[in-house]
Amino acid sequence: MRVKVSVFLLFLAVGMATLPAQARTLKIATLSPEGHDWMREMRKGADEIRERTDGRVKLKFYPGGVMGNDQTVLRKIRIGQLQGGAFSAGALVEVYNDMQVYSVPFLFRSYEEVDFVRSRMDEVIRAELENRGFVSVGFSEGGFAYLMSVDALSSREDLVGHKLWIPEGDELSQIALETAGISPVPLPVPDVYTGLQTGLIDVVASSPIGAIALQWHTRVKYLTDVPLLYLFGTVALSKKAFSKLSEADQAVVRDVMGGVLKKLDRQNRQSNEDARNALLNQGMQMVSPSPEEEAAWRSIAEQAKSAYQGRGLYSNETYETIQQQLEAFRANPVGALEP
């Protein structure tokens, strides 16, 4: 009997080992509207993942904000209703507060500075995010945000009395504006278009591609030509859900989605330039503040820095590391880029 039972268990074990791995669907929410370039590239990546894993891993997207704002999406990830989301960096500060350090107002002066710092810091941020329970499969640039408004704005005084939108929960922008004596209007991103329609807000800060994708450009007339802050985002998956995939399938997801986000990272810079030109061709007017006004805004950002650090909005260590990198680059841009 023992022999028969042992043989039975052996065949059972072999049979179970040859069963196909359980198929898993990763449900991912995003604010990106259906039909946008971002969604098209994501769906291509999903098709490749399904093919390379023989159908074991599928990605299902919920575009256009149908799953709610970022806080709602995070809650749904934590309870297992979703497995991931496409987030702006600031949306993940409750997970890891240094996620928003690239978006400190007036931190960067050029894309060259952005590239220099990101080449040294992206992997640090990715690793720390994973330590906190979220797997980033890649980062993607959103570009520089500019003020876009119903009325022309060329100075801080021009902003007084206007209703300037900031993303809900964006303490960095709120502190910077309050330091300048301006009271912003916090709203979730899906409510911004309606806010512009109704007059609840009349100024937004957005990248050109963001303004067009979300149709905000149809409600504003002017673009103030000063880059306020750098926008970037990530597709982050629940580490708990991701770990249920086999190691081989995890590698496929990282490889494919990482490639998609790298492609979008490159494309978005050119897309922002094209979008900016499109806005001007469609009649949006450019407002160019004086050098003195730009310097005044940078001074306000410096004043706000102590408030950022006092509230622990990012770690002093990470911020100082980036400042040291920027100082090295600004002192010798050519030498800094040499291997």
Image: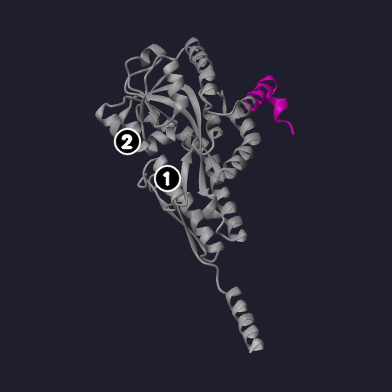
Q: Vertically, is 264 above or below 256?
A: above
Nearer the observer, 338 or 53: 53
Report the magenta residues as a range: 321-339
| Marks 1 and 2, the one that precedes in the sequence | 1
Residue positioned 28% across, 27% down in the render: 200
Residue 244 is marked as none
x then y, percent, for residue 199: 26, 26
Query: Where on the picture, by quarter, is residue 283?
Result: top left
Report the residue at 63% width, 31% height from top.
Answer: 117
The disc label shown at residue 191, or none: 2
User: Residue pushed farthest right?
Assistant: 339
Q: Which mark is residue 75?
A: 1
Q: Where is residue 116? Give x, y as percent.
A: 64, 31
Q: Is residue 291 above or below residue 75?
A: above
Q: Residues within 10 Å of mark 1 (few under 14, many from 20)?
A: few
Q: Amino acid at mark 2?
A: Asp
Residue furthest toward the front?
1
The disc labelled 1 sits on which kind of residue?
Arg
State whether residue 270 appears in this view: no
335 left or right, relative to 276 = right
Q: Is residue 63 above or below residue 23?
A: above
